[in-house]
Amino acid sequence: MPDASIPVTRSAVEQFTERYLRSLGCSIERSDEHWVVSVPEDTDAGISHGKHTLVRGEGAPDDDDDGTKRLHPESAFFQRLLREAGERSPTGKLSIESNSDIETPEWIHNGGVGVQNVEFTPYYDRTAVVVLFRVGIETVSEYQREFLRAVAVDARSGDHLPELADSFLELTSIESSEVSGGYAQLGRTEVEPLLDTARELVLDGLQDRLDEIHREASRAADSEVEEYRRLQEQRIEELLEEHSDLSSKISDLSEQINTGDEGSRVQALRERKELKSEYEELDETLNELRERRDGGFPERQREIRERHALDVRVTPLTLTEIEYERGEVDFKLRDGDTSRTVTLGYGSGVTETVRCASCDRVLSEHNPLRSISNGLECQICAKEQ
């Protein structure tokens, strides 16, 4: 799945914050180190009226009583603004026309075959939803990673439409001009299953990244378990030495009891009793440690691995209803003196899987079109000839 995501960088945070606050009627005086934001009395914003100083970059404290606030991806102020913006406009509607900018698929674009002409024929309008999720991934050994990811799903079929999500991000990016829209028409019962599908697609698209982070976390947990095991082995060795010393002292006291006079025997008996009690406690501690060691320290392992477990949060922020056209697109291809027209289903991106005429492999970004002399032939077949 294409990575239709927005990294939550400091630059993106600052651009979003400036655009959002200005849209509410706030004025901003900018400098290299901080911004002074003036919030008018008639502004319905999540921050109080008056002047606030936004300090750019990380640092503590996050919020001061004097109105100073930190502005960075993890700051409480930015998280509050992001949540407030989502609550203000949780849903919306856009229209995207397919015939304005037809996207050539990667398997043509990356190959050696030229495109002479592209012609789109619309058949009908379709509706999709684009859900913008905030994704947070965190482990005890990793700094929290956060980003925004958009997923597009056809409202009727539930099909995944990655190209539509990319188009949505381009249209609504901070750098782009303002776009006009409207109010979503889909009802709650129609939206809920689409939202579930979109969430599953987000998790599917994250799986490789989650597996990588999980492997890193597992290695960190294994290292901590091994360090704990080593320390416990060292502790057992120390207790064994102490155990042996106590045994020797008890033996010496037993000899004094057998050979000494009345006074020394009484003192030796008292000391031997105390040492035997200490010896028994130490013996019990050693047995417990050995038993836990032989079992692999299960409780400690469970505690360590729970602390190193992944915390993945996928939170929907906004849902936008998209009207888009579906139809067919004709790509007129030329390779030397040979030309061929390929007709494919299209709806904010090619919707068909195309296979090589010779080997039946799927044409893709990594196995692009190389020849049209004997049908559509892939790069692998061209190399084998």
Image (cartoon, rainbow, N blue to C red):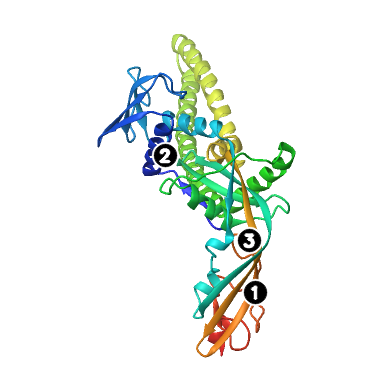
Q: Is residue 222 above or below residue 50?
A: below
Label 3 sits on a secondary structure element that is: loop
Mark 2 or 3 closer to N-term? Answer: 2
Residue 355, image x and y in percent?
Answer: 65, 76
Name which quarter of the figure residue 292 lies in. Answer: top right
The quarter in which the C terminus is drawn is bottom right
Residue at label 2? Answer: 16
Task: Choose between 289 and 52: the one closer to the eye.
Answer: 52
Residue 71, image x and y in percent?
Answer: 36, 33
Name which quarter of the figure residue 58 lies in. Answer: top left
Task: Choose between 381 and 100: the one closer to the eye.
Answer: 100
Task: Choose between 277 and 226: the one closer to the eye.
Answer: 226
Label 2 sits on a secondary structure element that is: helix
Residue at label 1? Answer: 343
Q: Quick check: marks 2 and 3 in contact, CB under 8 Å?
A: no
Amino acid type indicated by mark 2: Phe
Q: Residues within 10 Å of mark 1 (few under 14, many from 20)?
A: some
